[in-house]
Amino acid sequence: MTLGMTGLAAVVAPAVADTGDGTALVRVVQEVNANGTWDQALEPGIAGVTVTLTDTAGHSVTGTTQADGTVRLSPGTSLTGGKYRIEVKNPQPGALFPGFASPKDDLSSPTTLSSNVEFVNLSGGSNVEMTTSFWRPEDYCQKNVALVTACENPTIPTPVPDTSRTLTSLPFNARGEYNQLTTLATNADTGTVWGIGYNKVTRQLFSGEYAKRGTKYGPDGPGAVYQTDPATKQTHLFTTVPNPGTTPHNPGALMDEAFGPAVGKESLGDVDVSEDGKDLYVVNLHDRKLYRYDATQSTAAAPKASYPIPDPGCASVDDWRPFGLGHKDGTEYVGGVCSAESTGSKTDMRAVVQTFNPATGTFTGKVMDQPLNFPRGGVNPAVNGSICDGNGWYPWTEVRPRTQDGKDCTAGSPPDQIQNPEAELTNIKFETNGDMVVGFADRFPDLLGQGLPATPTNPATNVFPGGDINRACPGAGGLFVLDGNGGCKNNATPANNGGESPDVKEFYPGDYAFTDIHQEISAGGVVVDKVEGTIPFTAVDPIHATGNGVAWVDRTAGTRNDATDGDYLSGAFGKARGIGDLEALCDRAPTQIGNRVWYDKNNNGIQDPDEEGVPGATVNLYDAGGKKIGTTITNARGEYYFDASLVKNVNPADWVPGRTYTVKMDNPVDYASGPLAGWNPTNANQGGDPRADSDGVTSSGSTYPSTTVTLGGPGQDDHSKDFGFRQASDLYVIKVAGPSSEVAEGGQVDYDLIVTNNGPSPSTGWTLTDPLPTGLMNPTTTSDGCTIAGGTLTCHGGPLAVGASHVVKVRGIAGRTNGNCVKLDNTVTVKGNEPDPDMNNNTDTAITTVNCIPMIDPAIGSAAAAAALGLAGLLFRRRRTAGRTTL
């Protein structure tokens, strides 16, 4: 099974390949399960991603991934050197984040995921294939996750006990009858609920009341939203949504018939929790508003806000019936139908999805507006003998129709059977590639009930439901088009669609049951679990048994085995819909940080393509209190990662979104005798690209580099925490004065400034500074890279090998001394680009005397000699600061 990305991308035209270099095939996929491996069946390629190949000189070629997520880059004649850096640009910052990467010693396996910056060697005609990824943290879920749905319990003809289960959980892999079911709440706790939302952060479930004939509300009425702890199985009232409607249940009066018209128009629709766990959204079916609550609390006295859901232009304002919710990339999606109840015309039926911006509290437009008059499956008359078999959607009604498409609905055998699907758009989910999966429920069974006797308004009725699970794919202008209208691949064949008409177009033809009798069985709840190959949805007759439960279809082919791909949960409503929403109790996405330690041989602070990683170096992780919570060793390519789920070198309890951590390279052995012996931290934050620079800085009182990182939200991986190291160069300088240490006033003065690299590593460059004495007139230099300005000599030198020297020459004239003895006292300083392990030899001083006598023999009394020569003033000597004359 392969889940392909939709859309096309421009293909980079390969340059003419250089005979010495191979090519790099770069694949960019959308990761979903944080396992550091490209799972081809689950993780499609991403089209339109910019990928850059850069050589050591800084020249680049750029390409764009194709529909399968690949691009082949060739150095051609534009790049040289054989070694290159690959950088993959995030196409949707803020929505997509770097996917989990696996530490690896080489690039031999293209199914092992790399980080978004990689280093390749294409010399000698070598070709490289690598795969990197981005992901939406909201796509993450664990394998075999617990699913939660809501069983609905009748009050007519015979009430069920209040101990009957409502909220029920089951493993994703459960199949059969009542397989692995766990009761989370009962009818006494919640009454009849439909919408279910799960807060990954607080691990709490929310469920909202639902209006269904022949059932009862929970203890807190039609506006109640309940909170349930799946761990303790305790339920309490979270909030009461205002203005949910007032129609009462009355099972003793014509089997609650008067309540039927309230279905889909009162109480609550879908319930959804934002990905960050902060907001709970609830659709009020009565006032058609979206209510927003603080989802971090155990109760809410009032909503944070409410927003009227715009009428999308139905035939009548009263025909607009919002219900379903979904979210993606921080946007809330609100869906509903134009019911056509006011006109009774199929051409007025539409399914509409609008977007809501939580930041501004405004609806921002329609992303889907689709007619609902396309052919669908119904009850197969060839198998069942029904006449009104409901092969399509029908306008909403308040009573059982007597005719359907010109046929008498009381003339069948038996005459009470009918399928007359009335669409409710109840669920909105998204596939990995961005396609929309839409759950539709059938309102008609909730209006009419199941197997009820005739009344003055309605004949005896045995209702078959006809909900649907549909796929919508991007069409013209970016608007989604339903599969039934030809918007997606049609997977239906005579062998897999339950005997439907060839005119029916379906991405999921497997939503049928009972060996072709029921061709559409969805109850409206659906889960798209990106780490699984199938889609579960709530269904009628999920296996060959009359009742309700969960069924599974293949995510790509849309098929299922109707005898085995289901779990039967309840027979309380027979073939009528008796089950609600479906929710997966997914964990929060894990988070990873990293990733590279390298030798910065040219000391520019940038990870150049020809610079190798540091293998075998220790990287430690500390929490905000200074406690070491993780340690790892760089692999052969210098990579390191910290996470609690793949590498598993951090305890999950210590790895919390929003907290600040410190990454340090502080193992003394590494510097004494390990891979960093003779190396020091390079310059940090160079070049403007945080993915290709060094982040390690030394703080006060420490010689070890470190960097801090604050974890963002769950799954917001950060692979930009790199450490570069440059080698030390012990530069020393000697200053030699000439041609003699004694000159007369107006004589020539020469200086040789000799810079030598004492190792242990080559120097990439150095700067020499010499504030020349004020007594030196007309100083000049002929040495390259040297200038004299304001009396100061400044020289910039290039690379200097270990043991090599460079000589700078300066010449000047001894100035006037008015007959005095003057010493030209001159100090020079050199500073290298690299760290210098011995700064004591980075300066030197030379002294030239002007108009001075030879040094006095110490054996002669200095005072007497001075007096004899009339030079007592020389006994009082002052040392100058650098560049000043000493008298």
Image (tube, rainbow, N blue to C red):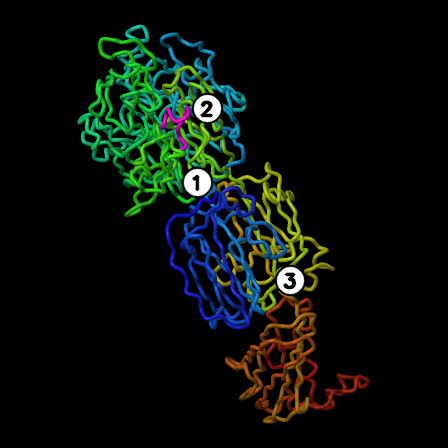
What is the quadrant of residue 828 in the picture?
bottom right
Q: Which residue is mark 3?
A: 680
**Residue 495 to residue 342: above or below:** below
Q: CA distance from mark 3 to mark 2?
A: 68 Å
Q: Pick whichever of labels 1 and 3 is earlier in the sequence.
A: 1
Q: Residues within 10 Å of mark 3 (few under 14, many from 20)?
A: many
Name the magenta segment's main secondary structure.
loop
Q: Is residue 270 magenta?
A: no
**Residue 329 to residue 228: above or below:** below
Q: Is residue 512 magenta?
A: yes
Q: Nearer the viewer, mark 1 or mark 3?
A: 1
User: Is 503 left, or right, of 173 in this rendering?
Assistant: left
Amino acid beneath label 3:
Asn
* 198 or 621: nearer the viewer: 198
Q: Position of residue 102 (x, y in %)?
A: 58, 49
| Mark identifier at residue 556 | 1
Q: CA distance from mark 2 to mark 1?
A: 21 Å
**Does residue 517 appear in the picture of this structure?**
yes
Q: Position of residue 741 (x, y in %)?
A: 68, 89
Magenta-drawn segment: 510-520
User: Is 348 left, or right, of 491 in this rendering?
Assistant: left
Q: Which residue is mark 2?
A: 543
